[in-house]
Every structure is written in C-alpha cells, then in structure tokens.
Amino acid sequence: MRVFVTGGTGLVGSRLAEQLRARSDVPVVLTRNRAGAAGKLPAGCEIVEGDPTVPGAWQDAVGTCEAVVNLAGENIFARRWSDAFKAKIHASRIDATQNTVAAIARAAVRPAVLVSASAIGYYGFHGDEELSEADGPGDDFLAQSCVEWEAAARAADPLGVRVAVVRIGIVLSTRGGALAQMLTPFKLGVGGPVGSGRQWMAWVHIDDLVGILLMAADDARVRGVVNATAPEPLPNKAFSRALGRALGRPSFFPTPVFMLRLMMGDVADVISHGQRVLPRRTIELGYRFRFPTIAAALADALNKGDKYN
C-alpha cells in the first residue's frame, strides 16, 4: 500500500514511516526540505517537496496513494503564544488539512481512507472527570483549533473517503516531545510535579500511537474519532514519581505554575491543567495496547533511547 504522509519527518511521522516500511508499504512523505528529510526517513520512502499550508504540485502525489495519514501541525510548545504564533498553529493544522482534502477531491483515483491527527486538547481543561470520544469540546484556543482541524478532515466524507480522526495524548518517546524535555531536570535530580501535581496526564507510548494510526488506516470499521491515549491516565504527581523511579532519581522538586507562565506564557496552561482521557472506542474496536501501564511504557522508552527495534 502507498501511504501519503504529511508531517512525516516529525516525531510521530518518522516512526510511522519506519513501521510502514517494516511491513513493505511505501510511505510517500511530504516535506518542505527534501535533503533534510532524506536523513530522517528509512530507505524505500518516496519524498515529495512542498508546503502543506499552500496548494501546489505536491497535491498530485495524493492521487497515487491508497491511504493518507495527515500529521502536519506546528509544535504548540515551540515558543510563547503570540498572536502570530497562534496563526501559525492554525495554518499548520487547518490550512494543511484543507489542502490535503482538496488534493483528495481532485484526484482521478481517490485514496480509500484519510487518517487525520487531532489532539486531546479538543476536550478543553478538566478536573477529575473521565472523558471519552463521546464528550464534547472545550472553549479555549486549543480546543477550538481542534474543532476546526477535525471539521476540515471530515470534509473528505462526502467524497466517499473513510475519515478517521485520532485525538493524540502526551506522546512518550526519548526522540522528542514531552518526555525528552523532562529527562534533563530529572536526570539532574531536580525533577518533580508541576504545580499541585493533581492535573491528569493522558499519555501514550509512541509505538501504541503508531499502532492506532495503522489500525485506523487498515480497518474499515474505524470511522470518526478514536482517542490515542493509554488506558491508565494518571495525575502529574504520579507520573513524576514513575519517571523518577525509572531513572533512579528523586522526583519531589515541584515547578510552580507562576514560574512556568513566566517562561512559557499562555501555553503553560496546557501543562498546569489536564484531561483524564480514556480510549474507550479505541479499545472497543479491538486495539490491544503494547504498553498499557506507565511503568512498562517508561521502561521501554528509556531502554530504547534513540534506537528502535
């Protein structure tokens, strides 16, 4: 199967490309930098140069593929949230998805499925209540961005394309993302919870995330929303303790929320609040998590380091 992938050189996309090649599929990866992408992707990938936020010749490659996995999106933690950066977050998600769907619409032979990323930020900030795919959106900037992001993907439905939306939690990998950023303070012995530590963290090991994306691409029963979060979310304080144990380091130095806001601005709210998100529909559809517990997920991620089996 040929699979068109946006965001294919990022943390999740590059791992997805590895798994697609491992099963003899051909990832067709969209990138702004062909030379840079070649060094990040496994042999056997096809590379298409282009910017997903801008229509262009890259759209022609979509019609050569049986499936599309849309992972394009600016890292929300890349910098403080200014109006300009919020606009960039919006364009990298909504504009990119609209252009991908436009490419599907004009293809002579359309892909059978669009798997499009979203985020658990869709649910907004919550306390202890359990959330699943059936729950509605929040009203903050990130939640409303996710609403628009998902709506852009669902525009492929009337085209006869099966659409699966994967709401992604906190991805655990030492290659990047939240875990990679947390490792340094913990290794230095100054790691610990953020604020009260009571906010919930809905996490997922990167290999389970990729497994859910592949299930969404392969299984015709997967339509609509599935959550890509492990079945055992936990409070930030418990996560910190688990990471400290895995590293053999202390985990009792809290980071005050006001300090986080001074350093990061509004995006600090994403860290100091949380959601207790469960993958109910994902499990109902038959996905079996390789790493359902935080101890197993951290042990595997830390053991692999920058290498994958």
Image (spheres, rainbow, N blue to C red):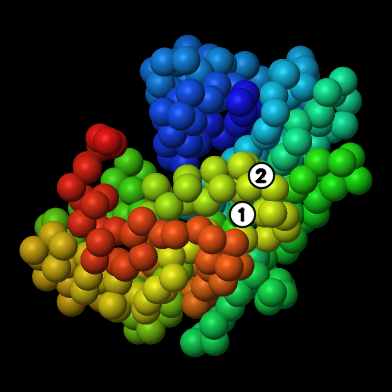
Q: Using the rendered image of the protein, determine whether residue 40 is visible from the camera's viewpoint.
A: yes
Rendered position, 96 above or below 152? above
Q: Nearer the viewer, residue 154 or 292?
A: 292
In the rendered image, the vertical position of residue 257 relative to residue 113, given as above or below: below
Vertical position of residue 47 compared to residue 9: above or below: above
Q: Is 69 left, or right, of 251 in this rendering?
A: right
Question: How many numbered markers are drawn?
Answer: 2
Name of the residue lying farthest toward the top: 35
Residue tagged 1:
166
Residue drawn 76% across and 31% down?
111
Crowdedness near tag 1: few (<14), some (14–19) or many (≥20) residues, C-alpha within 10 Å:
many
Indicate the amino acid at tag 1. Answer: Val
Which of the pair 270/293 is nearer the observer?
Answer: 293
Badge 2 marks a residue whose secondary structure is strand
Residue type marked 2: Val
Looking at the rendering, which quadrant does residue 119 occupy?
bottom right
Pinpoint residue 127: horizontal percent, then vertical percent: 52, 85
Residue at (36, 65) in percent of width and height: 292
- Residue 87 visible somewhere in the drawing: no
Upstream in sequence: badge 1 or badge 2: 2
Residue drawn at (52%, 73%) of the image: 278
Residue 160 located left or right of residue 148: right
Front-most of residues 173 and 95: 173
In 3D space, how far apart are the residues under numbered discs 1 and 2 (Cα atoms)? 7 Å
Q: Are marks 1 and 2 in contact (CB under 8 Å)?
A: yes
Q: Which mark is residue 115?
A: 2
Q: Quadrant of residue 27?
A: top right
Q: Position of residue 32 (x, y in %)?
A: 59, 22
Q: Residues within 10 Å of mark 2 (few under 14, many from 20)?
A: many
Residue positioned 68% across, 76% down in the render: 135
